[in-house]
Amino acid sequence: MEANIGITNNNSKAVSIELAKLLADEYVLITKTRNAHWNTEGIHFYEKHKFFQSQYEQIDEMIDKVAERIRMVGHYAIASLQSFLDTTHLAETALENNESITFIKELLADHESIIFNCRKNIHLFANDFNDVGSSDFITGIMQEHEQMAWFLRAHFK
């Protein structure tokens, strides 16, 4: 049964496409964060190991919320590794070492990229696609990434 929630089919499809990009970004980011968790080395290993774990757990919750939002607006969430790689804005990179600061720099850049894309979509969803619910949703996701970016950025003080 088609969703009858006050959004045209074209608009809900456009929203779902943008949300699929976010879902792909989140999935790539969780993979990169788990890599940091598993492979970080250095004098503060245990502290950083636990820090990266808290970050990937938070991203895992966001992944579920984004996929469910896509379903709420009446579409199917992408769900294969290849579709995530084909859709993401983020890049997989080979890091030069496994020091926590190297991982932190990379993850911070990714969070900031997601924040930028969310901020762009807030007005797009509300004004162009008449979907205030998804606009509000994306605002909350952006705020979570802002906090996570702040926690990463704090390591440079």
Image (cartoon, helix red, strand yellow):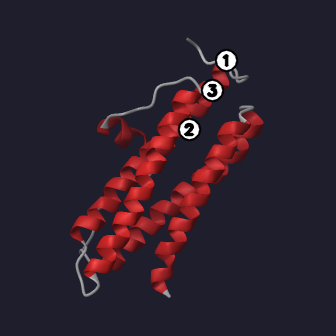
User: Which label belongs to residue 18?
Assistant: 2
Q: Residue 52 in the image: state x and y as whole percent.
A: 35, 68
Looking at numbered disc 2 in the image, what kind of residue is underneath it? Glu
Which residue in the protein does label 1 denote?
4
Residue 60 badge: none
Q: Is residue 90 left or right of residue 141?
A: left
Q: Quadrant of the N terminus?
A: top right
Query: Can you tell which quarter of the image residue 100 is in?
Result: bottom left
Q: Quadrant of residue 69?
A: top right
Residue at the right extreme of this rendering: 127
| SS for callout 1 | loop
Q: Which residue is mark 3?
A: 12
Distance from Cα at disc 2 to Cα at disc 1: 20 Å
Residue 88 visible (yes or no): no
Check if mark 3's residue and mark 2's residue have beta carbons within 8 Å: no
User: Of marks 2 and 1, which one's residue comes earlier in the chain?
Assistant: 1
Mark 1 is on which residue type? Asn
Q: Would residue 123 be found to the left or right of residue 156 on screen?
A: right
* Residue at 54 percent of width and 38 percent of height: 19
Depth check, front residue: 60 or 39: 60
The Cα atoms of the two marked residues, 3 and 2, are separated by 10 Å
3 w.r.t. 104: above or below: above
What is the quadrant of residue 2 in the picture?
A: top right
